[in-house]
Image (cartoon, grey):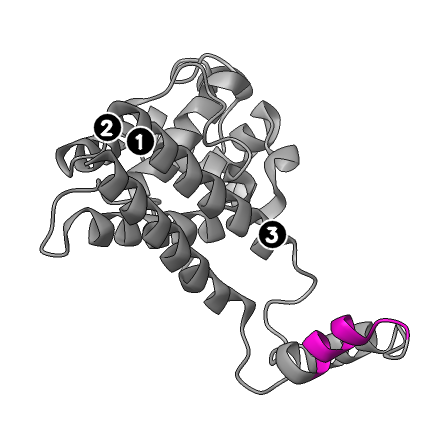
């Protein structure tokens, strides 16, 4: 008796959301350079021309990807800890989203046709700051400073040759052996007595720097008042 192959279930319909989700997976796996209309069509098992019913072109995909990342970050809102707690939560959530999508760091503030999630996020962040008492100028300073720090830290973190020294001690040790402690004593001190110590994590520096920035913004708010 000849067996018949199991019937395949119906393929999920092609939608803009599915296109963008697969585009994000391709970019996560191989960077934006691996994302082309052809590679995206192959990932979706469709013809490239089918994509144009849902996205206009590559630029439209990039706009959608940025909006997808913003949608992963909860919209800032007032909470018991006030504006400072809201900005802390936003900063950490944004850093986590950028860690999931390293390709996004250079795109987040570059799009000229931002999507709904992007615009709502910016509006909500500014709303928290303005309602807390920041002047229009001070709110602009705060937003620019926070995003510069978050994006810059995410970029630096993504570019490190090792995730943490504890995870790759041989790499850190090799780097430390590449220079003379006598010639570069302060660098050697930082490497040997801090970076190579058990439990050290570069990622822990994020909260330290964020706290310093928020302290400065609190002083700016007091000065405005």
Residue 128 falls within the magenta-colored stretch: no
Secondary element type, mark 1: helix
> Disc 1 vs disc 2: Cβ atoms closer than 8 Å?
yes
State the mark number for residue 138: 1
Which residue is the site of mark 3?
Answer: 156
Q: Within 10 Å of the Cα at label 3, are there few (<14), some (14-19), or many (20+) other Cα atoms?
A: few
Q: Position of residue 16 (x, y in %)?
A: 35, 25
Q: Which residue is drawn at 57% across and 56% down?
A: 157
Mark 3 element type:
helix
Q: Is residue 19 visible?
A: no
Q: In the rendered structure, find residue 135 and report the number of the disc placed on it.
A: 2
Of the numbered discs 3 and 1, the one sitting upstream in the chain is 1
Q: Give residue 107's position: percent from left, percent from top.
A: 51, 30
Picture coordinates of residue 55, whole percent (x, y) = 42, 17
Other residues around mark 2 within 10 Å, as few (<14) / some (14–19) / many (≥20) = some
Alpha-carbon distance for marks 3 and 2?
31 Å
Q: Is there any visible trace of residue 182 in the rendered image?
A: yes
- Where residue 20 sits, quadrant-wise, is top left
Q: Which of marks 3 and 2 is in front?
A: 2
Q: Total of numbered circles in the picture? A: 3
């Amino acid at each position: 008796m000849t067996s018949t192959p199991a019937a395949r279930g119906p393929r999920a319909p092609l939608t803009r959301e599915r296109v963008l989700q697969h585009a994000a997976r391709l970019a996560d796996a191989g960077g934006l350079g691996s994302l082309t209309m052809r590679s995206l069509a192959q990932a979706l098992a469709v013809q490239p021309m089918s994509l144009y019913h849902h996205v206009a072109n590559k630029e439209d995909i990039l706009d959608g990807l940025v909006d997808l990342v913003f949608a992963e970050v909860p919209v800032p809102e007032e909470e018991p800890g006030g504006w400072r707690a809201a900005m802390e939560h936003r900063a950490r959530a944004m850093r986590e989203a950028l860690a999931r999508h390293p390709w996004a760091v250079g795109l987040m503030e570059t799009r000229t046709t931002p999507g709904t999630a992007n615009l709502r996020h910016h509006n909500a962040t500014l709303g928290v700051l303005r309602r807390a008492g920041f002047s229009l100028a001070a709110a602009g300073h705060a937003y620019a400073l926070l995003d510069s720090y978050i994006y810059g830290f995410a970029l630096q973190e993504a570019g490190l040759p090792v995730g943490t020294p504890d995870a790759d001690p041989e790499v850190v040790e090799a780097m430390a052996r590449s220079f003379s402690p006598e010639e570069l004593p302060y660098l050697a001190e930082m490497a040997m007595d801090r970076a190579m110590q058990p439990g050290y994590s570069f990622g822990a520096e994020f909260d330290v720097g964020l706290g310093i920035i928020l302290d400065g913004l609190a002083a700016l708010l007091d000065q405005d008042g």
